Image (spheres, rainbow, N blue to C red):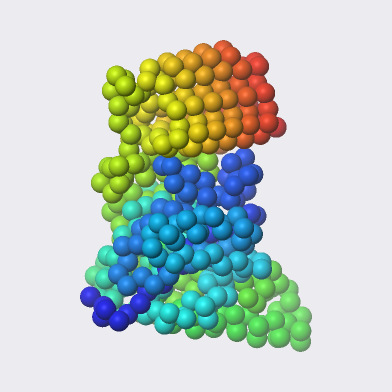
Amino acid sequence: MGSSEERVVAVIMVGGPTKGTRFRPLSLNIPKPLFPLAGQPMVHHPISACKKIPNLAQIYLIGFYEEREFAIYVSSISNELRIPVRYLKEDKPHGSAGGLYNFRDLLMEDSPSHIFLLNCDVCCSFPLPEMLEAHRRYGGMGTILVSKVSAETASEFGELVADPETNELLHYTEKPETFVSDRINCGVYVFTPDIFNAIQGVSTQRKDRANLRRVSSFEALQPVNRSLPTDFVRLDQDILTPLAGKKQLYTYETMDFWEQIKTPGMSLKCSGLYLAQYSSTSPHLLASGDGSKTATISGDVYIHPSAKVHPTAKIGPNVSISANARIGSGARLISCIILDDVDIKENAVVIHAIVGWKSSIGRWSRVQGVGDYNTKLGITILGESVSVEDEVVVINSIVLPNKTLNVSVQEEILL
Ligand code: GDD
């Protein structure tokens, strides 16, 4: 255990508008980190996990979205958790390590002994106190949360090899073309403040190379040198790869669930994972009902207190219903996210779908996906203010905002 004097800060990297393009059309009117999963903004899940870190002084969100987009959320979550949460805006993308370095003076104001760094677009149980304990035992500069994935999907992530005895990181390759390992980087780290020296080292090396470039035509021809600004530092390629095998970085493997949230399909899957987690962490957030006075609830379901669900509707499993939504009599909802102000009329069916803000689904209509979270048309997505008229069937499709559908569609992207 660390001393009670030691303070810890947590940083969550939220990226910016140019980063969330795979999340369209859902990121068209809300920053991806604020998209609701299991009824709470995506970033809320890592933030509330940080609350369990002993001696936590501050939580910072670093991104290049406009400050006003996070202002309301940041002030409400600070009050709720009674921990200061601040949004820090980068003037431009500095990369996952460069963004951290950019605010080093501010982050060091609390003289933290440790700094947690979390990607906001990962879904897991965030075993942060356990990581910190392991990190202290290892005595290195950083500890990385690691998970085992299938060999087929490993190449989508940073693949790594660790010493089975000491857990030291021995080898690290970012999204390699040929298979290295089924152990991957989960995007959750704890560092000592020495991380800032390591980032500064990369930046200084780049500056030196840039100076050299002015005098050497050979250096100028190297594509890697031409493309990266000196203050743009990536945690994975620029820090983890060169420091592997140098007794500075260690790994902590989670046996719990872990997923990355890059697409709407994955957000639906992760909403289900967080709902399942509520049964042990926040059971009060899960709805119940047997159809007598309230709707019939099956499995894990979140219903915002302001939503109106008819008692003859049947909801679940994996359903999340946001503020002011109205669910009519006889409606059936399975595996879906229903966003604010949606109107689902009598006897409509919604399965494996995300229904955008202020959309409406007519009587006896059906909005459905096949339920493959990893393919583009594996779930049906309705953007904001889409109107599906009565008795219309929408299957495996993406509908962009403000469309009215009066005929049935299948496997289509409607612009
Ligand atoms: N503030 C800020 N500024 N955030 C950034 C920036 C930046 O310039 N660049 C990326 N981020 C944020 C993203 O929003 C995301 O939360 C996180 O940093 C990592 O994003 P990427 O650098 O785009 O990497 P990735 O998500 O494709 O892969 C990383 O995470 C995987 C785990 O989810 C890598 O570290 C992989 O190795 C890892 O497996």
Q: Quadrant of the C terminus?
A: top right
| Count of number-bearing discs | 0
Residue 271, image x, y percentages: 42, 41
Please give the name of the residue rendered at 65% of the width and 83% of the height, measured from the top-left corner.
207
Q: Quadrant of the N terminus?
A: bottom left
Residue 385 in sight here: yes
Q: Quadrant of residue 159?
A: bottom left
User: Quick check: 319 above or below 190?
Assistant: above
The image shows residue 19, relative to residue 170, as above or below, that is above
Q: Residue at x 64, y 44 (%)?
A: 28
Q: Give the x, y percent position of residue 14.
A: 53, 59
Height in image: 362 above or below 339?
A: above
95 in relation to 183, above or below? below
Name the residue: 63% across, 24% down: 387
Does residue 339 appear left or right of residue 124 in this picture?
right
Q: In the image shown, does 98 or 402 lie closer to the viewer? A: 402
Say if residue 354 shows up in the picture: no
Rendering coords of residue 178 (x, y %): 48, 56
At x 52%, y 46%, the residue is 35
In the rendering, at what x and y percent does residue 393 appear?
56, 17
Towards the viewer: 32 or 347: 347
Compared across the picture, whether 407 is left or right of 71 comes to: right
Say left or right for 376 vs 311: right
